[in-house]
Image (cartoon, helix red, strand yellow):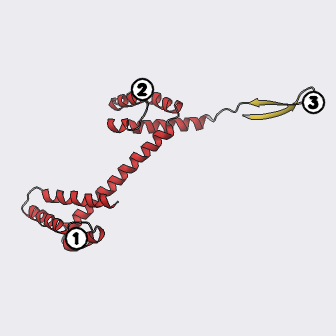
């Protein structure tokens, strides 16, 4: 609200208030961002949607939207959920939880790639040197177990057998990487 000062007939100061209209473009951008966030949530698994701790009606609507295809009804439902989140002032809470989920996911992807790289290095021609590097970086590593998995993986590769030991090596290295962070 802005003030407009004026004087009335008695010379007294009077104040009139005028409402300032909200910027429609800004409102549309905000609603669009909330809509995009709701759409991103709807692509999560039902267990993850329940973790948001939303009111039952909104949670139920999100779970229903997750089952819908690209239809007009889906878009209407997303708009309804967007309006409800804005009205109940839950946007910040939901955005914070969505960011936490995204960070967990990105962290898991990094760990996965790092574990794959270590496995590939351990199974390369200079696997013994890489084992030394692995032990330097992860002092808790069981050297004998890793050596055994290296040998078995290379044998399986030579004999065209399924890569059971390579999988076990990956899982062990992934555990090391996860525990280190």
Q: Which residue sits at x=22%, y=70%?
A: 131
Are the two marked residues, 3 and 1, in contact with CB atoms closer than 8 angstroms? no
Residue 118, percent across and down? Answer: 25, 64
Q: Where does the C terminus fall, quadrant-wise?
A: bottom left
Q: Which residue is mark 1?
A: 131
Marking on residue 11: 3
Of callouts 3 and 1, which one flags the residue occurring earlier in the amino acid sequence?
A: 3
Q: Which residue sits at x=26%, y=69%?
A: 134
Callout 1 crowding tier (Cα within 10 Å): few <14, some 14–19, many ≥20: many
Q: Residue furthest right?
A: 10
Is residue 92 visible in the rendered image? The answer is yes
Quadrant assignment, res 174: bottom left
Callout 3 crowding tier (Cα within 10 Å): few <14, some 14–19, many ≥20: few
Residue 45, percent across and down? Answer: 32, 38
Q: Toward the viewer: 45 or 77? A: 45
Q: Which residue is mark 2?
A: 57
Tell me the distance, in whole angstroms, between the alpha carbons under discs 3 and 1: 91 Å
SS category of the residue bearing label 3: loop
In the visual, does 144 lie left or right of 102?
Answer: left
Is residue 45 visible in the rendered image? The answer is no
Tell me the distance, in whole angstroms, between the alpha carbons under discs 2 and 1: 54 Å
SS category of the residue bearing label 1: helix
Quadrant assignment, res 65: top left
Q: Residue furthest left?
A: 159
Of callouts 2 and 3, which one flags the residue occurring earlier in the amino acid sequence?
A: 3
Q: Which residue sits at x=44%, y=26%?
A: 76
Q: Which residue sits at x=27%, y=61%?
A: 176
């Amino acid at each position: 609200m802005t003030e407009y000062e004026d004087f009335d007939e008695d010379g007294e100061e009077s104040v009139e208030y005028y409402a300032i209209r909200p910027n429609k473009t800004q409102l549309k951008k905000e609603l669009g961002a909330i809509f995009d966030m709701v759409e991103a949530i709807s692509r999560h698994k039902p267990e993850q949607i329940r973790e948001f701790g939303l009111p039952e009606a909104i949670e139920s609507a999100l779970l229903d939207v997750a089952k819908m295809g690209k239809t007009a009804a889906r878009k209407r439902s997303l708009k309804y959920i967007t309006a409800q989140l804005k009205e109940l002032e839950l946007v910040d809470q939901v955005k914070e939880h969505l960011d936490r989920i995204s960070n967990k996911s990105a962290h898991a992807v990094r760990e996965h790639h790092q574990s794959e790289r270590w496995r590939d290095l351990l199974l390369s021609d200079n696997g013994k040197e890489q084992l030394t590097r692995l032990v330097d970086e992860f002092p808790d590593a069981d050297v004998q177990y890793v050596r055994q998995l290296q040998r078995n993986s290379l044998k399986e590769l030579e004999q065209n057998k399924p890569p059971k030991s390579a999988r076990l090596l990956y899982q062990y290295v992934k555990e090391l990487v996860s525990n280190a962070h």
